[in-house]
Image: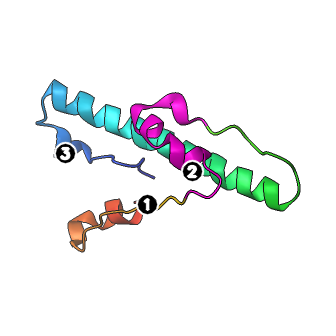
Amino acid sequence: PFPPGSERKEDSAHHTADRRREGAEINSSLHALKECLRAIAGAEAAAEAGGGKGPHIPYRTSPLTRVLADSFTRPRARVAVLATVSPGATDTEHSLHT
């Protein structure tokens, strides 16, 4: 499976070093966001089962998750995740992994 924000090797073969570095930073931030969302889901499951607070939410691991910290720490906050997918046949594999 592809990680969030991944590009096919042939799509990024002609990118500059700065563009590849930017893509790596985006992927790192998206990974941190995924880990925060997993921790929130775990905390909610633990609370429903009467297990107390649940796991720590690692929102300090990236600039993106730091900006969204209130969404992770406020009890009544809601988080919505939007994804862009393509109907094109050449992008099917990427869309499935989004």
Closer to the camera in the image, 30 or 76: 76
Amino acid type, mark 1: Val
Looking at the rendering, the stretch of residues picked out in magenta corresponds to: 58-77
Secondary element at image label 1: loop
Q: Are marks 1 and 2 in contact (CB under 8 Å)?
A: yes
Tell whether 39 sits left or right of 62. Answer: right
> Of helix, strand and loop, which mostly describes the magenta segment?
helix
- Frontmost residue, 15 versus 82: 82
Whole-percent x and y of residue 83? 35, 62
Residue beneath label 3, please? 10
Report which quarter residue 15 is drawn in.
top left
Kind of residue at disc 3: Glu
Label 1 vs 3, first from the N-terminus: 3
* Dot label at residue 81: 1
Marks 1 and 3, how far apart in space? 28 Å
Instruction: List the residue tagged with mark 2.
Output: 37
- Classify residue 19 as left or right of residue 59: left
Among the two numbered marks 1 and 2 on one chain, the one whose residue lies closer to the N terminus: 2
With respect to residue 18, does 95 lie above or below? below
Question: Are discs 1 and 3 less than 8 Å apart at CB?
Answer: no
Which is nearer the N-term, disc 2 or disc 3?
3
Write the residue at 42% across / 47% down: 3
Label 3 residue SS: helix
Residue 41, percent from left and from top: 66, 55
Q: Amino acid at mark 2?
A: Leu
Image quadrant in which the C terminus is located: bottom left
